[in-house]
């Protein structure tokens, strides 16, 4: 509630992924959540879990003037998430890392601002994750991984040791990437795929073993 002394935060987005992010943040209990913003008028006046949808993104500036200093972008699309984060940053918003209480993150792992780690996810020692990434439900990011900005590791996906995933790529639900593989920027790895060799930028790979289509 207002006056709690906690830092005030707004979520950008009111779709399905926003429910996951809202659950993470509410369970953390560290912030005074003022609500969500979304440009879809159909969401206005509704709620995402316990958070009201206050209107469109044109309200970002007003909320900043009212003392809301922090936000998280709760949008699944990688490019859109980074673009919206840039818009909020230009207005002076800051971004914390949000980690579900049931996630496990090694003390030596490094997570960039705006990154969200969902329930059951594991991030092991010396992993480095960029800004505004999503490590989704029960995903595993093993030791010494290097993940770029805007990466999304979908539910149940496993990145074995020493994997690199460049900016804005998505690893599909239940996919596996063997040790030491590099995945380029703007790639999509299909659900359940097993990646056994490097992938160049801007490709879609599916199957076992994964092949570019």
Image (spheres, helix red, strand yellow):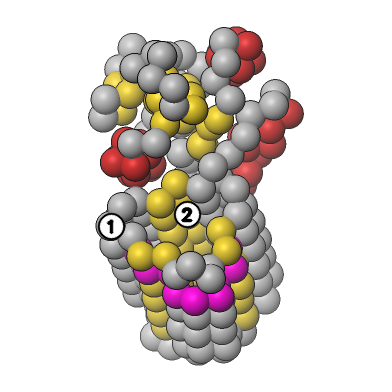
Pointer 2 local density, CA inside 10 Å: few below 14, some 14–19, many at least 20: many
The x and y percentages for residue 24 are 34, 44
Question: SS class of the residue under badge 1?
Answer: loop
| Residue in view at x 44 percent, y 59 percent | 135
> Can the viewer see residue 11?
yes
Circle number at residue 102: 1
The x and y percentages for residue 32 are 40, 25
Question: SS class of the residue under badge 2?
Answer: strand
| Residue in view at x 51 percent, y 37 percent | 72
Location of the C terminus (image quadrant): bottom right
Pointer 1 local density, CA inside 10 Å: few below 14, some 14–19, many at least 20: some
Quarter of the rendering containing residue 45: top left
Cα separation, mark 2 vs mark 1, equals 15 Å
Give the residues drawn in magenta, as a range. Answer: 121-129
Kindly identify which residue carries mark 2.
134
| Residue in view at x 51 percent, y 17 percent | 56
The x and y percentages for residue 199 are 62, 79
Q: Is residue 159 magenta?
A: no
| Residue in view at x 57 percent, y 16 percent | 67
């Amino acid at each position: 509630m207002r006056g709690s002394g906690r830092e005030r935060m707004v979520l950008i987005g009111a779709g399905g992924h926003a429910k996951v992010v809202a659950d993470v943040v509410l369970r953390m209990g560290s912030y005074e959540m003022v609500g969500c913003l979304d440009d879809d008028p159909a969401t206005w006046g509704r709620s995402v879990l316990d958070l009201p949808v206050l209107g469109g993104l044109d309200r970002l500036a007003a909320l900043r003037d009212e003392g809301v200093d922090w936000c998280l972008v709760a949008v699944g699309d990688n490019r859109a998430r980074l673009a919206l984060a840039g818009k909020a940053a230009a207005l002076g918003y800051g971004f914390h890392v949000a980690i579900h209480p049931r996630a496990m993150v090694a003390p030596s792992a490094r997570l960039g601002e705006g990154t969200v780690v969902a329930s059951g996810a594991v991030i092991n020692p010396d992993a480095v994750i960029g800004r505004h990434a999503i490590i989704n439900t029960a995903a595993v990011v093993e030791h010494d991984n290097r993940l770029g900005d805007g990466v999304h590791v979908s539910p149940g996906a496993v990145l074995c040791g020493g994997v690199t995933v460049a900016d804005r790529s998505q690893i599909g639900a239940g996919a596996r990437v063997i040790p030491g593989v590099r995945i380029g920027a703007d790639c999509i790895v299909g659900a359940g795929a097993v990646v056994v060799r490097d992938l160049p930028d801007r490709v879609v790979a599916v199957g076992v073993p994964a092949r570019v289509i």
